[in-house]
Amino acid sequence: MNHDLIIIGGGPGGYVCAIRAAQLGLNVAIVEVEDRLGGTCARVGCIPSKAMLESSHKYTELKHGLTDHGIKLGKVDLDLSAMLKRKDDIVKTLTGGVDMLMKKNKITRYLGLGSFVSRVDNQVTITVTPPDKKEKPATLTAPRVIIATGSKPAPLRGVEIDGKNIGTSTEALAYDKVPGHLVVIGGGYIGMELGSVWLRLGAKVTIVEYLDRIFPGLDSELAADAHKLFIKQGFTFVLGAKVIGAKSTKDGAVVEIEGKDRKPDSIKCDKVLLAVGRAPNTAGLNVEAVGLKLDDRGKVPVNEQFETSVPGIYAIGDVIRGPMLAHKAEHEGIAVAEQMVTGYSHINYDAIPAVVYTHPELAGVGKTEDDLKAANIPYKKGIFHFRANGRARTLGDTDGKVKM
Ligand code: NAI
């Protein structure tokens, strides 16, 4: 089949790009290896984690938080399977919605793994191999192909993922019972969000972090404030500790750590969540067939217009440079489609908001104070504490502050 544009990857980058390109008049194909469109964000990332964060927040509020308001409750019980079902239903509805958007915009959807075959006479050829391999691979051609294949959890040497006791965020979104003790490797976005879910539902949660702080990359003052609040909430932190191994045992797992100022140690637990970042996902793409080279971190190098070094082949989202955030990928999807058709696009990479959906949430946009210091840019700083804010007092949510 011939198309004007083929997009490989049906996540927030790919599907948003497909819609914009179709709106601008292109005949668009979208290739996705998973049954459901929507990518990591909708299937096993942002959406299900936010569903679990909301449910677990309500649970903990009812269990511990309403006496001050003068509200007395009877016994509050957890029905974990109902909570998980609610999350799964939200995922089904939203991913089904993406399917509908594809149909409405007359975008052709191919189910299977997209691989480059060749680029001859300005036409790129790819094959799409269905996941069950029962059907024959489809062959597609187009003058333009966009790689929007996203990212996958980064592995860690010595940590053996078995999907049972040692897993990634995908497993931690679906534990069928609350772990007695959960060890999270990595005090970043995923570790603190999913750690919060299981802490609220009753687990002991230990965060093992290589650095001497959590949330590297976020404003260090806000990260330090959050750290103190998380300790109050019941998290255990082991900072400055490098995980050098983790193995499943008969009834749980053991995590081995070492560090500059600590003796090698091991932590026994029921479950391990590995959350040490994400790696670009280019498995099976066969980029060599079109002469495309990845950089030394496995990312696809692109210029400001998202063009790779191979004419007609573009890339957006987690697979290229920049923060691995769904809304960044979406904007790149819109920009690359507009660039192709109208010759103009613009993204202000200094204005991408970031949010960690813990309680309290951390949110920021623009340069952090640390960025300004590092760049020797003079600045004025203003801070207002929520404890002095009337609305925050009435809500009973006085932790935290606003910093300009
Ligand atoms: P992250 O980069 O936020 O945090 C990973 C942490 O692991 C870092 O603090 C790092 O120092 C630590 N680490 C690395 N190696 C280690 C070792 N050997 N032992 C102990 N600690 C080690 O990555 P995370 O949390 O996995 O998230 C991945 C991506 O997903 C992020 O880039 C984030 O942008 C995105 N994400 C965004 C969310 C949001 O917008 N709310 C929610 C969840 C994920």
Image: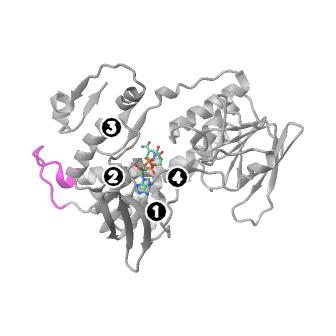
Specify whether tag 2 is near ligand 1 (CB below 8 Å): no
- Crowd class of label 2 (few under 14; some 14 to 19; many from 20; radius 10 Å): many
Q: Residue 4: x, y in percent?
A: 79, 36
Secondary structure, magenta segment, majority class: loop
Q: Residue 348: x, y in percent?
A: 53, 25
Q: Kindly identify which residue carries mark 4.
A: 43
* Mark 3 to mark 1 CA distance (whole Å): 30 Å
Q: Amino acid at mark 2?
A: Ser
- Crowd class of label 3 (few under 14; some 14 to 19; many from 20; radius 10 Å): some
Viewer-side label of 3, 2: 3
Mark closer to the chain start, 3 or 1: 1
Mark closer to the chain start, 1 or 4: 4
Mark closer to the chain start, 4 or 3: 4
Q: Is residue 65 magenta?
A: yes
Q: Amino acid at mark 1?
A: Glu
* Mark 4 to mark 3 CA distance (whole Å): 31 Å
Total labels: the figure holds 4
Q: Amino acid at mark 4?
A: Arg
- Crowd class of label 4 (few under 14; some 14 to 19; many from 20; radius 10 Å): many
Q: What residue appears at the point 68 percent right and 46 percent down from the top-left corner?
A: 294
- From which residue to which does the magenta span run? 61-75
Q: Is residue 150 magenta?
A: no
Q: Secondary structure at mark 1?
A: helix
Q: Kindly identify which residue carries mark 2.
A: 55
* Mark 4 to mark 2 CA distance (whole Å): 17 Å
Mark closer to the chain start, 3 or 2: 2
Viewer-side label of 1, 4: 1
Q: Residue 284 lies in what quarter of the image?
A: bottom right
